[in-house]
Image: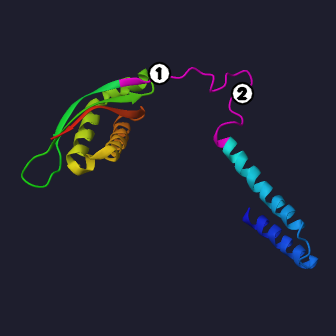
Amino acid sequence: MGGGSGMAAGAAAQAAAQDGGGGGRRKPLLLVALAAPLVLGGAGGAAWMLGLFGGAEPGEPAAQAAAPRMPVFVEVPDVTTNLSAPGRRAVFIRLKARLEVTGQQDAAAVAAAMPRILDLFQTYLREMRPEELRGSAGTQRLREELVARANLAAAPARVVDVLFQEIIVQ
């Protein structure tokens, strides 16, 4: 892939040298000729990534025409635990959340794995420091970590998101 463009550039340089540098009009055409495959390749790659090629078989409904799935939410029991805080004063977190899953089958699997999910949540929270929870970046990091732990505990069910109802740190 890289060798072909190098040879084309070398041939263009050789043609310009033979021309004696008087081919000022040929240089823009040469640049267009070299850039066109790159632009078309990039556009084709973007179209493929967006799913514009292929997809549904003839006679099958398109994926975009299918009805969107309604998310299912699984209630997580309240979690209250201490954080890893330096000093003598204990710092606690109280967390109320719901887990978003893709369907009823995943909801049943997540509910069955709830003791393991709670254990992973509490273990993770006890290792956190209060300053790690500050701001929206801290909340987003907490969300990502809890989703990862919930997916680990409830596999093969898939947890899409953790929706916080309440986070209190005192």
Q: Position of residue 78 (x, y in %)?
A: 21, 30
Q: Position of residue 136 (x, y in %)?
A: 33, 43
Tell me how many marks there are. 2
- The quadrant in which residue 142 appears is top left
Q: Against 40, is 107 above or below?
A: above
Asked if residue 42 lies in the magenta stretch, the reply is: no
Q: Around disc 1, counting alpha carbons within 10 Å, would you say few (fewer than 14), some (14 to 19), or many (20 or more)?
A: few
Q: Amino acid at mark 2?
A: Glu
Mark 1 element type: loop
Q: Amino acid at mark 1?
A: Met
- Front-most of residues 57 and 132: 132
Q: Position of residue 73 (x, y in %)?
A: 37, 24
Q: Against 114, is 33 above or below?
A: below
Judging by the rendered image, the residue that carries numbered circle 1 is 70
Instruction: Give the position of the N terminus as an image quadrant.
Output: bottom right
Task: Calculate the distance from the C-alpha at mark 2 to the C-alpha at mark 1.
Answer: 25 Å
Instruction: Give the position of the C terminus as an image quadrant.
Output: top left
Q: Residue furthest left?
A: 88
> Looking at the rendered structure, which numbered label has been put on residue 78?
none
Q: Position of residue 65 (x, y in %)?
A: 63, 22
- Front-most of residues 23 and 139: 23
Is there CB contact under 8 Å for labels 2 and 1?
Answer: no
Judging by the rendered image, the residue that carries numbered circle 2 is 57
Question: Which SS does the magenta portion mostly show?
Answer: loop
In this rendering, the label closer to the viewer, 2 or 1: 1
- The quadrant in which residue 95 appears is top left
- Magenta extent: 48-73
